[in-house]
Amino acid sequence: MNTNDIYEKITNVIIEMLENHKHSNYTESWYNLSGDSIFAKNIASNHVYSGINQLMLNYLKQKNNYAFNRWLTFKQIEGFGGRIKKGSKAALVVYKSAIYLDAETEKNITKQVEYLLKNLQSIEHLKLKKVGYLKSFNVFNLSCVDGLPDDFYKLAEIDKLTDFEKDERAEELIKNFGVKIDFDARNEAFYKPSQDKIFMPMPKQFVSKDAFYSVIFHECGHATAHPTRLNRPILNKFGSKEYAFEELISEINSAFICAYLGYESRITDNVSYIDNWLSVMKNDKRFVIQAASQAQQASDFILNSAKVEEYVMTE
């Protein structure tokens, strides 16, 4: 299968799955050393945060190099006898709430409505006006708190994990691409433009060979944006369309490269990730087409770096 066919096939699969709102059973790419899911959660209640809270808490975790993706409220910290470290900053968590007004008098009858609902009684006889609004509270990352139960801080033992057999073709692509890669026992993977360097968890942390290469080629996709390569804007504000667009480019690039390597089973996980970013942009499918075009340039660059001549694009 040549490169044109790969690009067209993967792009079509992604668009079809998004259009039909199909979601894979998302599987994590690596064993998290903190024992966490990759998703932010409240360690006291085991509640997994959703929506914008998930995006923002993960952003703060990476920005502040927190070892954990575990969070607690001030009240929970007090209840466990914990102490917040000096200089630590809280993160904001928001949730939807509502008040109920009498549609005729505008009187606030929220307590009456909540009482009826709590006791499984009908509210159909009431003429209601429901007004939604956002409420918020603060949470602290576990890394900012001392004195909590030992189990809260428990880390996985990396020595018990085993390495996989490396893929020679994939390793050749990575080697010839030439970007420096720092492997360490960490819980995140990212590309740092200021150093032109990729930071990755240890290979043995990954759940499989294809998961490892899917992630590393995502980060290589970001690295193609460097001014010495394809010179794409990459220093974008988190949560912006530009930030999401770059994520799309890198993830579709990863899908392309993984398909070239024969790891097409990773496509569903690629789509799961892509759909998350599209939701930030109100699920605008046009971004897939536009991002796929630039992802094609990125994967061409990586393939050409390794002199994979039989896959080079032609006009």
Image (spheres, rainbow, N blue to C red):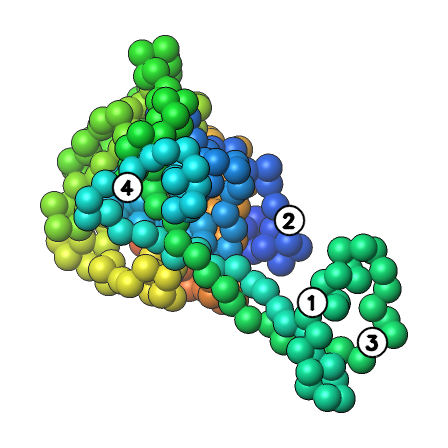
**How far is disc 3 from disc 4 in space, using C-alphas?**
47 Å
Label 1: few (<14), some or many (≥20) within 10 Å? few
Q: Nearer the viewer, residue 165 or 163?
A: 163
- Element type where label 4 sits in the image: strand
Q: What residue sits 31% from the left and 23% below the top?
A: 203
Q: Nearer the viewer, residue 43 or 55?
A: 43
Amino acid tagged 2: Lys
N-terminal of the pair, mark 2 or mark 3, is 2
Q: What residue sits 35% from the left and 46% below the top?
A: 140
| 15 is higher (above) or lower (below) than 44 | below
Mark sitting on residue 22: 2
Location of residue 104 (image quadrant): bottom right
**How far is disc 4 from disc 2 in space, using C-alphas?**
42 Å
**How far is disc 2 from disc 3 in space, using C-alphas?**
39 Å
Q: Mark 2 or mark 3: which is in front? A: 3
Label 4: few (<14), some or many (≥20) within 10 Å? some
Q: Which residue is mark 3?
A: 126
Label 3: few (<14), some or many (≥20) within 10 Å? few
Count every numbered label the image shows and give the total: 4
N-terminal of the pair, mark 1 or mark 3, is 1
Amino acid tagged 4: Ile
Q: Position of residue 56 (x, y in %)?
A: 38, 54
Location of residue 305 (image quadrant): top left
Image quarter in which the C terminus is found: bottom left
Q: Which residue is mark 1?
A: 111
Q: What residue sits 51% from the left and 67% below the top?
A: 134
Q: Position of residue 103 (x, y in %)?
A: 74, 84
Q: What residue sits 57% from the left and 49% below the top?
A: 13
**How far is disc 1 from disc 2 in space, using C-alphas?**
40 Å
Amino acid tagged 3: Leu
